[in-house]
Amino acid sequence: MSVEGLSVNFATIKQGGSFGTLVDACLAHGITTISPWREQVHGVGLEEAARIVSQNGIRLSGHCRGGFFPAADAQGRQAAIEDNKRAVDEAAAMNADCLVLVVGGLPAGSKDIVGARQMVEDGMAALLPYARQAGIPLAIEPLHPFYAADRACFNTLKQSLDLCDTLGAGTGVAIDVYHVWWDPDLKEQVARAGRNGQILAHHICDWLVPTTDPLNDRGMMGDGVIDLKGFRRMIEKAGFSGPQEVEIFSHNWNSRPIDEVLSTVVERFKTVC
Amino acid sequence: MSVEGLSVNFATIKQGGSFGTLVDACLAHGITTISPWREQVHGVGLEEAARIVSQNGIRLSGHCRGGFFPAADAQGRQAAIEDNKRAVDEAAAMNADCLVLVVGGLPAGSKDIVGARQMVEDGMAALLPYARQAGIPLAIEPLHPFYAADRACFNTLKQSLDLCDTLGAGTGVAIDVYHVWWDPDLKEQVARAGRNGQILAHHICDWLVPTTDPLNDRGMMGDGVIDLKGFRRMIEKAGFSGPQEVEIFSHNWNSRPIDEVLSTVVERFKTVC
């Protein structure tokens, strides 16, 4: 029996082995919506991954991930665009809802965050016709400001939606509670995104207190301070009814048996989300 | 010879001993503006600290720190207000430019960040008449969103300035590059704060890539990705001409000899700030 409305991002269970193994583990827990990472797809080859997805009736709430547009020179920026086209191809072959973009931070040696943002805009503008052609929406994931320097120089919903408005059709946002829960402008911007049909994905986990590791200490839903039920009400009120995708980067959870992780995910999804 | 425009926050040299020792070390490097922490003042007693400040012609660019207004019950919130009054007394006795506020995060067990923000507003409103009477401006320091849960639920300049506008005279902001450098709305909000005379302090350090510890891995100016000269131009253009206060929480710098730290601070201040 399928767990309606739940998706599992494969970062949450990356300890579990190959793409096929992870899909099987999800299916055993009634999870039929997933979001894989490119290296997991590459591990079995795109054709085989697409076959597994199709034959098992799997839905992809997203494909992770494109982005990282800024680079120190034009050649590097062009290479990023080409690589993003391959990510679009993969998303299309697996019929993903969207390609999630971690847009990139400062090029090496740079202190110019405004310039980096321009590189993101330029890179996305160059990629967009290809993505539209493939029918794959581009989902900017505003990352927590902690990652502004090295992963994503778009850090709030407002800033990301402003860019979507500039770029137009085929763009939107992935709203991850971990990255945006603190934002004083959250409610207004979620409503705005919903109004304009720009919510492409909704990721969940929790914010632990204390958070000891800036990269790999995300919490299981219910273990932290985010009002997850309230967040979901807000996003549904904005018109989004897509799945809640569980994405937990965590040394803790990534070191446990995959069945324990998935059992916990399903139980918490049903009780606190 | 005094180093014009430089202040040293005593968090940067907390390994250096008592209040008097830290002041002497600063004076030896030509630093005559400081910002101490309450426990350092308490260590020698307020009267002695005020005497040291006065006799040595020391200026305090701020007193660190008040705040932490949210609490689980009314008694806890009232206790916070009373404690903040003592911090105001200390700031007044040492003739500090302002009392810096780390406003506090979520009360234990709470997931209600909107409610916590209201507690901050209520606490500041209760404190403000006392602070005005003492002639001590209250400086909200918007903290990096990484600290939203456990230290400060005010995380952007805009949000903090909105609260200042609500509360009125005697309030403003401490602008720390570490906390706000990533903000897409930075330029507009610094200009707004300047226009309204709300810039009470300007803290500097740098953002390291990677940042390995969320609490104690701030960088020495020049070692990270913040455009410090550009930031200073922006803040001066907004009308602020007060000192740049060096505040570096760092296991690295806090484990070095205090003279090495202060030599480096002065050299970097003169070259990259």
Image (cartoon, coloured by chain):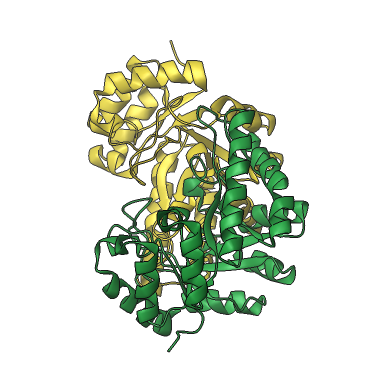
Chain colours: A green, B yellow
Q: Where is residue A123 in the image (x, y as percent from the top left)?
A: 67, 42
Q: Find the residue positioned furthest to the bottom.
A: A1
Query: What residue lies at 54% left-to-right and 33% top-to-bottom?
Result: A107
Q: Nearer the viewer, residue A142 or B100?
A: A142
Note whether residue B88 is visible.
yes
Q: Position of residue A153 (x, y in %)?
A: 57, 44
Give the left or right position of residue A210, taking residue A157 as reference.
Answer: left
Q: Nearer the viewer, residue A132 or A239?
A: A132
Note whether residue B143 is visible.
no
Vertical placement of A143 versus B230: above or below? below
Quadrant of res B149? bottom left
Vertical placement of B62 versus B78: above or below? above
In the picture, the quarter occupied by the C terminus of chain A is: bottom left
Q: Where is residue B13 in the image (x, y as percent from the top left)?
A: 30, 30
Q: Which of B125 and B147 is in front in this view?
A: B147
Vertical placement of A31 versus B157: above or below? below
Q: Find the residue positioned furthest to the top.
A: B1
Give the left or right position of residue A90, taking residue A258 as reference.
Answer: right
Query: What residue lies at 59% left-to-right and 28% top-to-bottom?
Result: B232
Give the left or right position of residue A85, taking residue A270 as reference.
Answer: right
Query: What residue lies at 31% left-to-right and 64% top-to-bottom?
Result: A16
Q: Position of residue B42 (x, y in %)?
A: 27, 43
Quadrant of res B266? top left
Q: Nearer the viewer, residue B176 or A270?
A: A270
In the picture, the quarter occupied by the N terminus of chain A is: bottom left
> What number of labels is visible?
0
Give the left or right position of residue B238, taking residue A38 as reference.
Answer: right
